Image (tube, helix red, strand yellow):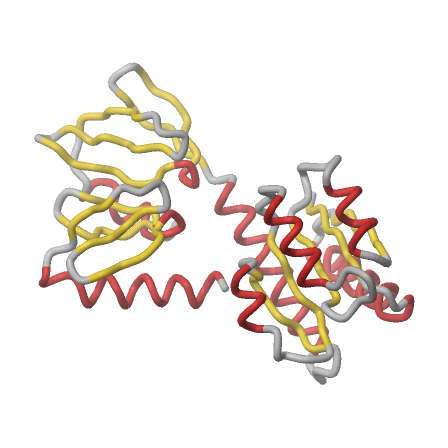
Amino acid sequence: MLKIYLCDDEDFFLDEIKKLILAFGKNKNIDIDVEAFKSGQDLISAYGKDEEVDAVFLDVDMPDMDGLETAKSLRDMAYESAIVFITQFISYALEGYRVRAVRYILKSDTQFEDSLNEALTYIINEKTRLEKRIELPFTDGKRFIYLSKITYIESRLHNLIFHLEDGSELNMRGKLSSLEADFKDHYFLRIHQSYLVNLAFVDSISYCSLKLKNGDELPIPKARYRDVKDMYLKYKGEVL
């Protein structure tokens, strides 16, 4: 199931985009629930009562509360749903970056349906990635863990320390090399002999160090710096 909020003040576009989204779901055999709104205020009101929204498709140019203001309000509410802007203009790219919009789709684009389908495919793939979990033999017993909750894994004297988003830690005997290949497809990068990092939690990279969103700083060897930076930029290009 994919839940999508759609907001546009023009009935024609609202109906057409909803039809295209539902047609995509039918073609892919995916249940998609679309709720349509004609104003940012109405969407915000509904969103505050619903934490299960996977994506929000927003028209930028709307009266009273435009798409950018709506997106900022959503982020201020700490919701992490994917945001896709559907607009007549592309001049809002910088503002969209600030609210972590994943796609811009031009209403005038002759390939509009293809662009919409590509955005939906990305959202589904990202949802699948975030829900991916694996079972590992931690020192306190086997348990399942969501890969998206791991900020980084540290290797220390044949002991692997899993640093989690909530600040807690899990321990397991083993080597980073045994996890590296499987985790690579989920945006984990070996930045150092002792660290395997979830790129989703990287705040910035400076020469020979990497800063995470929780404030932790990890070293990057000079020999790996260029490759780490290039891989991070590639990751940013894929998710934005």
Q: Provide residue 68's location: percent of width, then percent of height.
A: 67, 63
Residue displayed at 75% across by 64% down: 66
Q: Provide residue 127's location: percent of width, then percent of height.
A: 56, 47
Quarter of the view holding residue 173: top left
Q: Is residue 145 left or right of residue 159?
A: right
Residue displayed at 72% across by 85% down: 110
Q: Provide residue 63's location: percent of width, then percent of height.
A: 83, 66
Q: Quadrant of the N terminus?
A: top right
Residue 48 or residue 174, whichever sits in front: 48
Query: Taking 123 as reference, is 91 above or below it?
Result: below
Residue 97 or residue 232, whichever sits in front: 97
Q: Provide residue 107's location: percent of width, then percent of height.
A: 74, 77
Quarter of the view holding residue 17: bottom right
Residue displayed at 47% across by 40% down: 132
Q: Is residue 139 left or right of residue 90?
A: left
Toward the right, the furthest residue is 11
**Total numbered labels:** 0
Residue 66 or residue 35, whichever sits in front: 66
Toward the top, the furthest residue is 140
Residue displayed at 60% across by 46% down: 76
Toward the front, the furthest residue is 64
